[in-house]
Amino acid sequence: MPRVAGVDIPNEKRVDVALTRIYGIGPHSATQILKAARIDPGLRAGKLTEDEISRIAGAIENDYVVEGQLRRQVQQSIARLRDIRCYRGLRHIRGLPVRGQRTRTNARTRKGPRKTVAGKKGIKEMHRG
């Protein structure tokens, strides 16, 4: 498995698809990286020579923030929002959706599994006593 930007990319996949395994590189970025490195996107990752791998690594290093550094940047941005106590920061703190989604229903990804609360007793049941 070729190693690019600290990530093993799968041998059997096309290079343009394999590069998307790197955090911070999507399909469009992968295509642009291969164009800059002058490598055929249809080539399998296992067939890359050392020279081609180093050209890809160089193109990524020069123009993109990826993996650990990008994760750190994202975490610092979220921490800044929390520190200044803005609306988005408060949503992060409370573990609720940040981008304006509804929360009355759905939002289970952010809120976690349902916490069922017992319903109120009906008026008829209270008078039977």
Image (cartoon, rainbow, N blue to C red):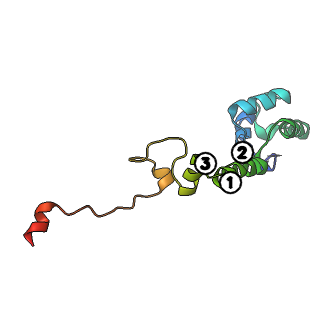
Instruction: Give me the disc on residue 7.
Output: none
Tell me where residue 16 appears, x and y as whole percent: 73, 33
Q: On the rendered structure, is 104 left or right of 74?
A: left
Instruction: Bin the neighbour count of mark 3 within 10 Å (Cα to Cα): few under 14, some 14-19, many 20 and up.
Output: few
Q: Is residue 5 visible?
A: yes
> Is residue 73 depicted above or below 58 in this figure?
below
Q: Is residue 8 visible?
A: no
The residue shown at (86%, 30%) is 37
**Nearer-the-camera pick, 78 or 31:** 78
Of badges 3 and 2, nearer the viewer stands 3
Tell me where residue 55 appears, x and y as whole percent: 89, 36
The residue shown at (24%, 62%) is 120
Where, quadrant-wise, is the C terminus in this rendering? bottom left
User: For numbered disc 3, what is the local secondary structure?
Assistant: loop
User: Type of residue at label 1?
Assistant: Ala
User: Type of residue at label 2?
Assistant: Tyr
How much space separates mark 2 and mark 1, taking CA atoms? 20 Å
Mark sitting earlier along the chain (2/1): 2
Q: What residue is shown with label 1?
A: 79
Q: On the rendered structure, is 46 left or right of 86?
A: right
Tell me where residue 19 appears, x and y as whole percent: 74, 39
